[in-house]
Amino acid sequence: MTEGLSMQQESLMDFDADVAALDDSSRALARGAPKRSAILMCAPDYFGVDYIINPWMENQVGQATLPRAQAQWENLRRNLAAYSDIAFVPPTPGLPDMVFTANAGLAIGDKAVVSRFQARERRPEERPYCDWFEAQGFAIAAWPENVPFEGAGDALIDPTRDIVWCGHGWRSGEMAPRHLEKIFSKRTIALKLVDPRFYHLDTCFCPLSGGRVMYYPAAFDIASQEAIRAIVPAEKRIDVDEKDALSFACNAVEIGGRIFLNACSDELRARLTDAGFTPVVTPLSEFMKAGGAAKCLTLQLPGAAGKVTPRG
């Protein structure tokens, strides 16, 4: 051990070396970058595993290491900032999961739906998220109080097809797809989730550019698997195995062909590369203890670049 440094500090120093390598890669990729997007994030000042509301949190209460979580989050933020305007919602004490901004709601253009959380532990997040959307000038669409909906955790925009894929079964209600279709005037495809480890759609399904979709088929019921196959041609489907799924490979953020994700097997990396994508691994082990990774930590705001106030 380096004199005067704790094991934890040495570990974070090693991680910083990895961060530097990833940042160099991002700066190189940024040359000739596509049109910038907008993403909402929340600093993990109060992040921790303080309760259990999904299987990933089992035996993890109090086990998250905040300094490492902050370093991992900052690594992701720096990588994304090369291609996106990053806006921030202020973290709130006592709301450890607010860092997972994918669950803030769903925003398309200047309209937003604020989430109605199924878990009572997360319901206090609704007010600060609503305040942020209103402050940025979004029109807040009405949503029924008795229909759970957890934002872009369960509602994913497929820009190639101009549709919304909407998961239900664990966190969002069965009626959520119908309400989204009416609010945003976009065809919405309902997908039923059946594996509690994949409690949000974004943990097992990721629409990619060019009409491709990366997903874990076993997370869905048979009817939903058939719906995906009916809409997405075989050559556009990138199905992942259980190992990659459990590493939250599908919980990814794609910007202009670069896919930012927690982990990626050599086999999946080869398939993504062959499809024209560039996987960028940004380790997020501390957030995995709470059941989240890259996609969970971000809310993409299509049509909002230049509208929101970027700070990173």
Image (spheres, rainbow, N blue to C red):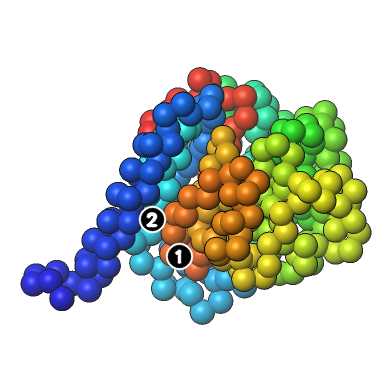
Can you see residue 93?
no
Residue drawn at (66%, 25%), measured in percent from left and top?
109
In this rendering, is residue 222 above or below 148? Answer: below
Contact check, label 2 and label 1, Cβ < 8 Å: yes
Look at the numbered disc 2 and give the secondary structure of its residue.
helix
- Crowding at mark 1 (Cα within 10 Å: few <14, some 14-19, many 20+): some
Q: Which residue is mark 2?
A: 72
Residue reaching furthest front?
A: 274
Q: Looking at the image, which residue is at 48% across and 29% down?
A: 33
- Observer-nearest residue: 220 or 63? 220
Residue 38 rendering spot, x and y as whole percentages: 53, 31
Q: Is residue 311 above or below residue 154?
A: above
- Residue 177 visible in the displayed image: yes
Q: What label sits on residue 3 in the rendered view?
A: none
Q: Measured from the top left, where is residue 231 in percent x and y?
A: 86, 44
Question: On the image, which quarter does residue 197 sit in?
Answer: bottom right
Q: Quadrant of the C terminus?
A: top left
Which of marks 1 and 2 precedes in the sequence?
Answer: 2
> Which quadrant is the N terminus positioned in?
bottom left
Q: How many marks?
A: 2
> Neighbour class for label 2 at 10 Å: few (<14), some, many (≥20)?
many
Q: Nearer the viewer, residue 162 or 125?
A: 162
> Residue 234 at what x, y percent from top left?
82, 51
Q: CA distance from mark 2 to mark 1?
A: 8 Å
Across and down, in percent, residue 64 comes to 41, 68
Query: Which residue is at the far left?
Result: 3
**Residue placed at 41% from the left, 73% from the top?**
63
| Residue with the mark numbered 1 | 285
For badge 1, the amino acid type reads Ser
Q: Name the side, left or right, on which 250 lies relative to 195.
A: left
The three-letter amino acid code for the residue at tag 2 is: Gln
Which of the 4 quarters of the picture holds residue 300? top right
